Image (cartoon, rainbow, N blue to C red):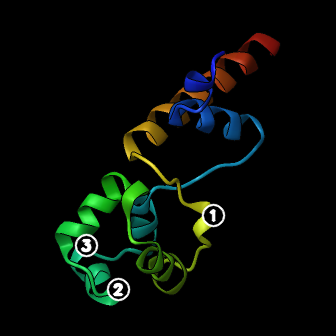
Amino acid sequence: MNDQTYLRPENILRRHFAEGKHYVSLREARLNIGKSLKEVAAAVGITVKTLKRWEADCGKANLIKLSMLCVNVYSIGISHVWWGAESVLLEVRAEYYATKESEGKRHA
């Protein structure tokens, strides 16, 4: 595996899953506390449009605002949030659990 492939977000995430590290997306964190986009955006002082953009991919989010969002609103550490595209997180998570399930069936 070359450096470019090794550093791709989906490969980083696969390694983290294999090491037992699991993440949530910002959207999942918001849904877990039952708040609307409007409520959360207002609580942090950002627009709904910005929050939607961050929920899709928080890799370019303002770190201070993102930290406030995670700690003050979602009550989670920022290290529990996937810093990238939510679509990559969901894809790799589905792949990980599908593999785990098929491994379990083979050993049963």
- Judge depth for marks 2 and 3 and give the one in front: 2
Contact flag, marks 2 and 1 (Cβ < 8 Å): no
Specify the label residue 26 is tagged with.
none
The local crowd at label 1, few if under 14, some if 14 to 19, many if 20 or more residues have their Cα within 10 Å, is few
Is residue 86 toward the left or the right of residue 103 in the image? Answer: left
Is residue 33 toward the left or the right of residue 53 in the image? Answer: right
Residue 93 lies in what quarter of the image? top right
The local crowd at label 2, few if under 14, some if 14 to 19, many if 20 or more residues have their Cα within 10 Å, is some
**What is the CA distance from the residue labelled 2 to the residue labelled 1?**
18 Å
Q: Residue at the right extreme?
A: 107
Q: Say if 84 sits above or below 74 in the image.
A: above
Q: Residue at x 38, y 40 (%)?
A: 87
Name the kind of residue labelled 2 in the image: Val
Mark 2 / mark 1, whichever is N-terminal: 2
Name the kind of residue labelled 1 in the image: Ser
**What is the CA distance from the residue labelled 2 to the residue labelled 3?**
11 Å
Q: Residue at the front extreme?
A: 3
Mark 2 / mark 3, whichever is N-terminal: 3
The x and y percentages for residue 30 are 40, 69
Task: Tell me the SS state at disc 3.
Answer: helix
Q: Which residue corresponds to mark 3?
A: 37
